[in-house]
Amino acid sequence: MAAQRLVPVVETSNIVKDGGRNSLSWNEAKKRFKGFSENKVNMAYECVDRHVEEGRGQKTALHYLNEGKEQKISYDELKQRTDQLAAVLKKHGVKKGDFVFVFLPKHPDCHIAMLAAIKLGAVVGPLFEAFMSDAVRDRIGDCQGEYLITDRELLQRVPREDLPSLHTVFLTDGSGQNGEISLPEALSETLDEEFVLEWVDAEHGLNIHYTSGSTGKPKGIIHAHRAMVHQYQTGRWVLDLNEDDVYWCTAHPGWVTGTVYGVFAPLLNGVTVVVHGGRFSAEQWYHTLETAGVTVWYSAPTAFRMLKSEGDDLPGQYDLSKLRHILSVGEPLNPEVIYWGAETLKHRIHDTWWMTETGAQLIVNLPSETIKPGSMGRPFPGITAAVLDDNGVEQPRGTIGHLAVKAPWPGIMKEVWKNEAKYNSYFPYEGWYVSGDLAVMDEEGYLFFQGRSDDMINSSGERIGPFEVESKLIEHPAVAEAGVIGKPDPIRGEIVKAFVVLKKGYTETPELKEAVRKFVRGELAAHAAPREIEIVAELPKTKISGKILRRELKARELEKLGAGA
Ligand code: PRX
């Protein structure tokens, strides 16, 4: 490895300007938000109104690009539009503590809907735009959600008949057949001055994201407004945001990265946020970097691998001269990708590690520090991480164990919705949050990801619970039993692979396998549908409880891959 290619850029980064990694005290960091001392805060105030009050209203807050279409929204306009929408929501009954789900594509309307709900002190539940009806039903149903903001197209995937609690649905593009409220109409009758922002205490619920584990349905992780301290500070030191930055996070707000680092952290830091609509295409992505003049870019290993696979000539065809800082999250970042970044994009790619539950980045590569390719980085200042053995005892450096973090910290989840036992399960040892990831720490405190201690699947950085996919598979008329694992994949990290036992009377054909795959895709979500289905005569099971042994399926698969290599 040519060390110079990865030299740190020390002088210019915020953390250096601010005094270095030892200069952080969370109590000091809190002082940026004056409401903390009076327990009167609001994330949306800090993201939007504050910048207007401090004279930055003219600045572009959101820059939307989608295949030739462009729209710029200033902080002034963002304040006016979020106030006006909040006034409409309030008129229709939304109040402090209510859940407001937002099911919209990557578009400023999605950001505006989320921030408007937060201005009212509601708990916002952004839903990923590719969710199908089962995923939508599970989430809104679990919260007994009463309010939803969506559009006419996505409304088709909202099974209203199964969601009796959902009494009010707002559409961003007109009215619907079941009493859905047309927002363009409602907004035209409402003035933004009618609205006064709700102050909440720092512990008040802010957002809910559902996330998968190895068992059961996805769980609702609720975060609190206090997360703003952690999200602002990591935005400043890890993303290295300055007010003149143009920043692009490629995740949809339906995933925690898209909310925390696509909406909150950059707006807290007062930058211009690029919102790119539409699907992945290498040309479109490079075009967006060029046209918007992106300076700081946060994406994921699968996306970088997909860009890499398009050839090294492509980036040279675009003017990427504004780009100065690149980051990655969600899955292991392979050294080859870091070398590709240094060679082709002429920048280091800074890996970051965190989870839905953690609310913000915990293990990071700071712009001022050395990157060790293959490592997720070191704990963010103010965060203590360790590698523990099965009894909660800290392991010596270089030994694999459970990646754990000293709790609490400002971004940590507030609760798991209606599931205290699940919340408590993250804290099996006094004072430690245990992540479920396995890791090794080296002498200098760098952490290296070693896999999961459970069966959770990570495909393209998306967290998938095998139980959820298995449950869906056995709803198909041809499927008797199913076991689902993550199979290593060079581009996506892992792919979902299903082992299926067919019911009597069904025989294996390519058409049947495709029909089963489409069934999961159509009802759950595309990312959860098995890319590979193997028909087997039986599944390995535990002798006593008869539970499917996913580990055994995975071991066999890895052996096959090893044998083939
Ligand atoms: O296994 C780790 C993996 O993603 C999990 C968290 O997934 P989720 O809650 O969906 O949040 C994703 C982004 C915040 C972790 O338990 N993961 C996340 N970042 C990394 C990672 N694995 C390896 N390297 C990372 N940098």
Image (cartoon, rainbow, N blue to C red):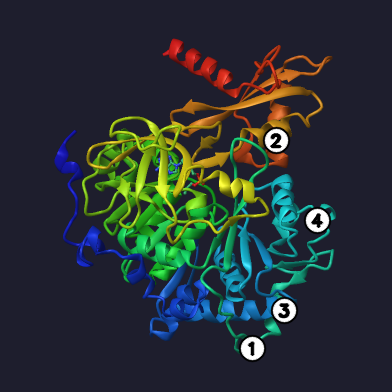
User: Tag 4's secondary structure?
Assistant: loop
In which image quadrant can residue 232 be found?
A: bottom left
Q: Position of 208 compared to 66: left or right?
A: right
Do callouts 1 and 3 mark residues in contact (Cβ within 8 Å)? no
Which mark identifies residue 186?
A: 3
Q: Position of 264 compared to 27: left or right?
A: right
Do callouts 2 and 3 mark residues in contact (Cβ within 8 Å)? no
Mark earlier in primary sequence (4, 1): 4
Q: Is mark 1 within 8 Å of ligand 1?
A: no
- Give the residue at x 72% y 18%: 501
Instruction: Measure the alpha-carbon separation of dots 4 and 1.
Output: 31 Å
Could you tell me the amino acid type at mark 1? Glu
User: Tag 3's secondary structure?
Assistant: helix
- Give the residue at x 72% y 33%: 471
Q: Residue furthest bottom?
A: 193
- Label 4: which residue? 163
Q: Is mark 3 within 8 Å of ligand 1?
A: no
Which mark identifies residue 520?
A: 2
